[in-house]
Image: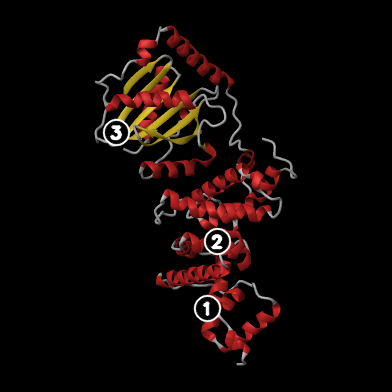
């Protein structure tokens, strides 16, 4: 199959796919769910290409993906408890030193509401400023801050509640 | 501690941890944190967590071999003119036959009242085969390159733990992929395979209301043959336009591989 040219719309989306894949996975609970969200998003983006105003393609796509994530989960009524089913699907180039720690972190992320998780990931994974998050999600900046605060409080509670003492090797 | 430092808010602390402050404000918070160990601990925790979250998902930022297909809307190149022509010919023959009244009575007869639930399975399997096996671009929803995802997804929808996609390589059939489809009004799974010559066959799995088991049964319609059986709460059907003895081997292999 031939790759679309760099100057085409498809070519630009293609160039964004790796980072979109990372963001979609950061929102979801498994590799499979991450790929599903990515696919749904690309389909929607291609279908709506006429609505893109020609500026900041990446931001436009990230907003569409975030909204798909929040709406999709509500519509399908997906249970909040979906087991981690695909963590082994992706071959890790640089595995974290402690897989237990990774899964603890992921469990804590999975305990967040969709709204709070999306805000946290836009900031941490995508490097959005608080103002950019507010614009992307069309919410007041105060709401961004309260969601971020709630996300971090919840994460902190979850990580502490695990009653695990993490051993860290000196670097 | 001076006047300005007393106005440090939680929002400032988040912004500090996230590196979202201009230099001057940064220095102000830094000074505050040296005097306020509780806040300093929170900020340190958030910063460390940011790094851990980034590291957790860093490996996902990569291209895969499905990327081009994703953006071009072609999940997989396929070339099926022969099969499509054959299906078209069957449809044309039946269509003309129906118009002329030749097959009319058989086609439009009301369903036999004695048709039990068991007998609907081969019909659904045959219909699914006829509809999807001739499909050029989208014979399946998830292709074989995502087999693990396919098994997980369909296993969830059918509520089958550890659903495994049957491996028919020994019989010369390679997995094309699979899709979700209704089987007797509930979520069912279809797996598609093809041999080197491009002959396809399908394996259908559906949930059955009653819990009973059957031996293999056989149904034939035109050139399309189906082996089907029920094993506890699940019904299975193997369908193809291939010799009966080959199809039977496929059915036996599936029966062996599916969890009982």
Q: Position of residue B130 (x, y in %)?
A: 46, 23
* Colour mapping used in the image: secondary structure
Q: Position of residue B133 (x, y in %)?
A: 49, 25
Q: Which mark is residue B231?
A: 3
- Marks 3/1: CA distance? 57 Å
Residue A57 is left or right of residue B224, and the answer is: right
Residue B61 makes an appearance in the image:
no
Q: Secondary structure at mark 1?
A: helix
Q: Position of residue B105 (x, y in %)?
A: 35, 11
Of the two numbered discs 3 and 1 in the rendering, the one whose residue sits closer to the viewer:
1
Quarter-of-image position of residue A138: bottom right
Q: Secondary structure at mark 3?
A: strand
Q: Position of residue A90 (x, y in %)?
A: 54, 51
Comes first in the chain, label 1 or label 2: 1
Which residue is at 48% across, 59% downward?
Answer: A114
Residue B228 is left or right of residue A154, and the answer is: left
Eyeballing the image, is B227 above or below A39? Answer: above
The disc numbered 2 marks a residue on which chain?
B
Residue on which disc 1 sits: B42
Residue B9 makes an appearance in the image:
yes
- Marks 2/3: CA distance? 42 Å
Residue on which disc 2 sits: B56
């Amino acid at each position: 199959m031939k790759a679309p040219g760099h100057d085409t719309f498809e070519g630009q989306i293609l160039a964004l796919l790796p980072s979109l894949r990372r963001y979609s996975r950061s929102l979801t609970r498994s590799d499979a769910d991450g790929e599903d969200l990515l696919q749904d998003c690309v389909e929607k983006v291609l279908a709506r290409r006429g609505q893109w105003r020609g500026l900041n393609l990446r931001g436009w796509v990230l907003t569409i993906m975030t909204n798909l994530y929040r709406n999709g989960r509500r519509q399908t009524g997906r249970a909040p408890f979906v087991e981690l089913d695909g963590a082994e699907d992706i071959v890790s180039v640089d595995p974290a030193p402690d897989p237990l720690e990774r899964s603890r972190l992921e469990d804590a992320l999975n305990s967040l509401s969709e709204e709070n998780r999306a805000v946290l990931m836009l900031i941490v994974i995508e490097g959005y400023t608080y103002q950019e998050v507010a614009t992307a999600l069309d919410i007041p900046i105060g709401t961004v801050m309260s969601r971020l605060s709630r996300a971090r409080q919840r994460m902190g509670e979850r990580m502490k509640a695990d009653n695990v003492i993490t051993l860290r090797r000196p670097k | 501690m001076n006047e300005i430092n007393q106005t440090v808010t939680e929002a400032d602390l988040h912004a500090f941890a996230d590196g979202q402050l201009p230099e001057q404000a940064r220095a102000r918070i830094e000074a505050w944190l040296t005097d306020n160990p509780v806040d300093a601990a929170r900020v340190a925790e958030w910063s460390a967590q940011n790094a851990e979250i980034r590291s957790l998902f860093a490996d996902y930022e990569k291209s895969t071999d499905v990327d081009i297909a994703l953006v071009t809307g072609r999940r997989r190149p396929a070339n099926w003119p022969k099969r499509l022509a054959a299906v078209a010919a069957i449809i044309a023959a039946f269509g003309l036959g129906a118009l002329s009244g030749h097959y009319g009575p058989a086609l439009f007869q009301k369903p036999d009242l004695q048709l039990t639930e068991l007998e609907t399975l081969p019909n659904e399997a045959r219909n699914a085969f006829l509809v999807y096996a001739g499909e050029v671009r989208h014979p399946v929803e998830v292709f074989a390159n995502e087999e693990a995802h396919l098994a997980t997804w369909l296993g969830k929808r059918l509520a089958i733990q550890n659903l495994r996609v049957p491996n028919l390589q020994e019989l010369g059939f390679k997995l094309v992929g699979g899709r979700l489809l209704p089987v007797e009004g509930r979520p069912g799974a279809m797996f598609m395979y093809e041999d080197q010559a491009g002959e396809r066959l399908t394996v259908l799995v559906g949930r059955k209301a009653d819990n009973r088991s059957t031996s293999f049964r056989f149904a034939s319609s035109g050139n399309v043959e189906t082996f089907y059986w029920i094993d506890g709460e699940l019904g299975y059907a193997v369908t193809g336009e291939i010799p009966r003895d080959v199809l039977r081997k496929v059915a036996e292999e599936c029966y062996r591989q599916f969890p009982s």
